Amino acid sequence: AQSVTQPDIHITVSEGASLELRCNYSYGATPYLFWYVQSPGQGLQLLLKYFSGDTLVQGIKGFEAEFKRSQSSFNLRKPSVHWSDAAEYFCAVATSNFGNEKLTFGTGTRLTIIP
Amino acid sequence: DTAVSQTPKYLVTQMGNDKSIKCEQNLGHDTMYWYKQDSKKFLKIMFSYNNKELIINETVPNRFSPKSPDKAHLNLHINSLELGDSAVYFCASSRGGQETQYFGPGTRLLVL
């Protein structure tokens, strides 16, 4: 069965520092991968997605992610974080099983930004 | 012009009551979903519908009954609410397959 692991429950970084959030997936077929962000009390907003092609994908708000098939990873990066980036980040894999498509989410990484 | 909307945003109710949450999407998508986010922020799919037909039912108690009157709407009715039903419920929609899912703002349900 498919699964997504986000090994870091909580990360704290200083404003202006670089950021990397880890995501590992387990899925037998070609994965469709997503990063979503959830600000406090809000819904989920899509940051970026990988379907095929270039393994480095650019998203909104200056985020990027790199798909590494050999490592089953899809890590999210940002070169310089802003205080407004404080939120919960979810990695997800879209799986398809005879039409039963669904998103399987990781447990999320809470990002705290310190001045 | 909200893409995926849910009502109500907050719902506080007593155990044993019956309540409904409504979801509407104006994206022209064929597939809609309900997800539950628990107190630890874990998100798990509950149901998906494609063109008003139930596709996924992830071992959700039968107290939960989704209804899709048309492909732009997917409502969630919950009977005999229990304390453990307290959570945030998210509606989402997509073009189907493994395409991007767009989420509503969530409905925060608190059962007392």
Image (cartoon, coloured by chain):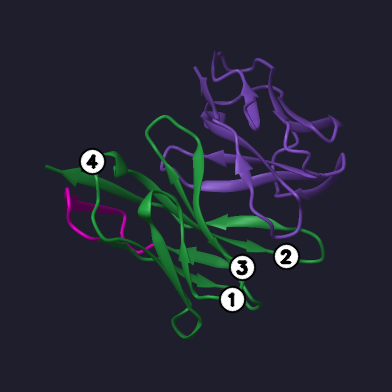
Chain colours: A green, B purple
- Check the image and report above or below for A115 versus A90: above
- Check the image and report above or below for B11 versus A47: above
* Crowd class of label 3 (few under 14; some 14 to 19; many from 20; radius 10 Å): some
The disc, 3 or 4, on the residue closer to the chain's N-terminal end is 3
**The magenta segment:** A6-18
The one nearer the camera, B59 or B70, is B70
The disc, 2 or 4, on the residue closer to the chain's N-terminal end is 4
* Crowd class of label 2 (few under 14; some 14 to 19; many from 20; radius 10 Å): some
Quarter of image, res B71: top right
Q: What's the distance in space between the residues labelled 2 and 4, CA to CA? A: 37 Å
Specify whether A100 is left or right of A5. Answer: right
Mark count: 4
- The residue that disc 1 covers is A53
The disc, 1 or 4, on the residue closer to the chain's N-terminal end is 1
Q: Which mark is residue A83?
A: 4
**Would you say the residues marked 3 and 1 are in contact, meaning their CB atoms lie under 8 Å apart?**
yes
Question: Which amino acid type is marked by label 3?
Answer: Phe
The one nearer the camera, A53 or A85, is A53
- The residue that disc 3 covers is A51
Outermost residue toward the bottom in this view:
A70
Mark in the foreground, 2 or 4: 4
Question: Which amino acid type is marked by label 2?
Answer: Ser
Numbered disc 3: secondary structure = loop
* Crowd class of label 1 (few under 14; some 14 to 19; many from 20; radius 10 Å): few
Instruction: Mark yes or no: residue B40 visible.
Output: yes
Question: Which amino acid type is marked by label 1?
Answer: Gly
The disc, 2 or 3, on the residue closer to the chain's N-terminal end is 3
Numbered disc 1: secondary structure = loop
User: Residue A39 placed where, x, y %?
Assistant: 39, 37
Question: Which amino acid type is marked by label 4?
Answer: Trp
